[in-house]
Amino acid sequence: MRKTNLASCLMVIGIAVCLIAGAAVAAEVSQGKCIQFDQASNQITIEAYDLQFSSQFPYGQPSGENEVFDVSGAAIGIHPEPGDILRLAWVNKGSVKSALKVMNVSKQDLRKK
């Protein structure tokens, strides 16, 4: 009986640790057109898109707002160029939006597969 209680307690503790760790790495996501990729300063500027998808705007409508991301520690897939549609997973580090992953949506459109 004690082994069952111990196993149950360990399972509950393990689940709690996984939930806490999963919440700690939750990231925001932004998508938009690449305005500039400055490799010297490790920054990407995008014109953010909203969530109003249509046949005319399959990635969302341009919001007119520019967002700047620090990509010094980011995993970058296909090299971004101005005009490409990018999706960035990022976290706030103080006043800096620090990208975790940069995906080039326009050059690797998963909807076509």
Image (cartoon, helix red, strand yellow):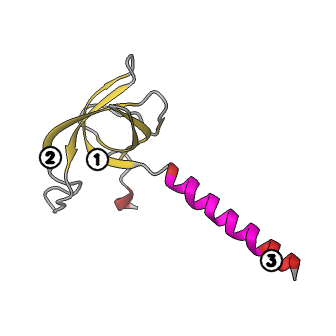
Q: How many marks?
A: 3
Residue range (magenta):
8-23
Q: Is residue 18 left or right of residue 36?
A: right
The mark nearer the N terminus, 3 or 2, is: 3
Quarter of the picture holding the N terminus: bottom right
Tell me which corner region of the image, top left, top right, bottom left or bottom right, holds residue 3: bottom right
Task: Name the residue type under label 2.
Answer: Pro
The mark nearer the N terminus, 3 or 1, is: 3
Is 20 included in the stretch rendered in magenta?
A: yes
The structure residue drawn at horizontal position 14% and vertical position 46%, both measured from the top left corner, is 63
Say the numbered circle drawn on residue 41: none
The mark nearer the N terminus, 1 or 2, is: 1
The structure residue drawn at horizontal position 58% and vertical position 53%, both measured from the top left corner, is 21
The residue identified by callout 2 is 62
Label 1 crowding class (10 Å Cα cut-off): few <14, some 14-19, many 20+?
many
Label 2 crowding class (10 Å Cα cut-off): few <14, some 14-19, many 20+?
some
Instruction: Tell whether label 1 touches label 3 (CB within 8 Å).
Output: no
Closer to the camera in the image, 11 or 9: 9
Task: Name the residue type under label 3.
Answer: Asn
The residue identified by callout 1 is 31
